[in-house]
Image (tube, rainbow, N blue to C red):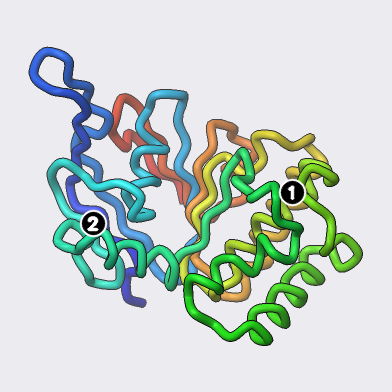
Amino acid sequence: MNSLVEVKNITKIYGMEAATVKALRGVSLNVKHGDFIAIMGASGSGKSTLLNIIGCLDRSTTGDVLIEGKNTNILTDSQLAEIRNEKMGFVFQNFNLLHHLNALENVETPMIYAKKKRNERLERAKMLLERVGLADRMKHLPTQMSGGERQRIAIARALANSPELLIADEPTGNLDSKTGEEILDFFVLLKNEGLTIILVTHEENIAAYADKIFHMKDGLIVDEEG
């Protein structure tokens, strides 16, 4: 099975000279199509920095990140945006929804950037909201919904363009334990359907849903399970 993501000895350094911070110190990992991996570590371990680089939201200082064989370090910003829109879906702890748009419009938004026709956008957005259990909440604004419902909108939006990779940064961080378990059960279902998932967390019970766990400390992967 070919790799979807290859991370090759990357570093990430912020600042200059005496004020530099080494967020990543030489990280390598391989993510194959269909993997569900968790990246664990305490705050400041480098896990979110690594996730942002894999997700083409940031660039490494040295080393290479390949997405389906393409070296993201040599791509332009517009090419990186194209990869994010076509191949990746993102789920964040704080949901990152557009509060002036209702649930349906939030899910539709990535498909607008992908230049899909309006009828196609609406049909898929409705289908995805039905799938995450929000068929009766499509016209509600995020401010009218619970945290769990907001995260379900965010997941539906992440799936809008049929991504190959779902990137989730502390996706249950603002949810109660029962709702968090429901979200993670849905991730497992998506994984079983062939979606590749990279999840960042600092909690062992959350990471346990993944097939493989990478432990980070001080900008390095120090252990691997699975």
Q: Compared with residue 62, is residue 126 higher up or lower down, i.e. above or below?
A: below
Image quadrant of residue 94? top right
Nearer-the-camera pick, 37 or 65: 65
- Residue at x 65% of width, y 35% of height: 173
- Residue at x 37% of width, y 61% of height: 31
Q: Amino acid at mark 2?
A: Val
Image quadrant of residue 205? top right
- Residue at x 28% of width, y 33% of height: 220
Nearer-the-camera pick, 182 or 85: 85
Q: CA distance from mark 1 to mark 2?
A: 31 Å
Q: Residue furthest left?
A: 17
Nearer-the-camera pick, 218 or 77: 77
Q: Is residue 145 left or right of residue 210?
A: right
Q: Which residue is mark 1?
A: 150
Tell me the crowding category of disc 2: few under 14, some 14 to 19, or many 20 or more residues within 10 angstroms, Cα based.
Answer: many
Q: Residue furthest right?
A: 136
| Residue 120: x %, y % from top left | 65, 86
Tell me the crowding category of disc 1: few under 14, some 14 to 19, or many 20 or more residues within 10 angstroms, Cα based.
Answer: many
Pointers 1 and 2 in contact (C-beta within 8 Å) = no
Q: Amino acid at mark 1?
A: Arg
> Which circle marks residue 137 in the picture?
none
| Residue 170: x %, y % from top left | 57, 39
Q: Is residue 84 left or right of residue 200?
A: left
> Which circle marks residue 65 in the picture?
2
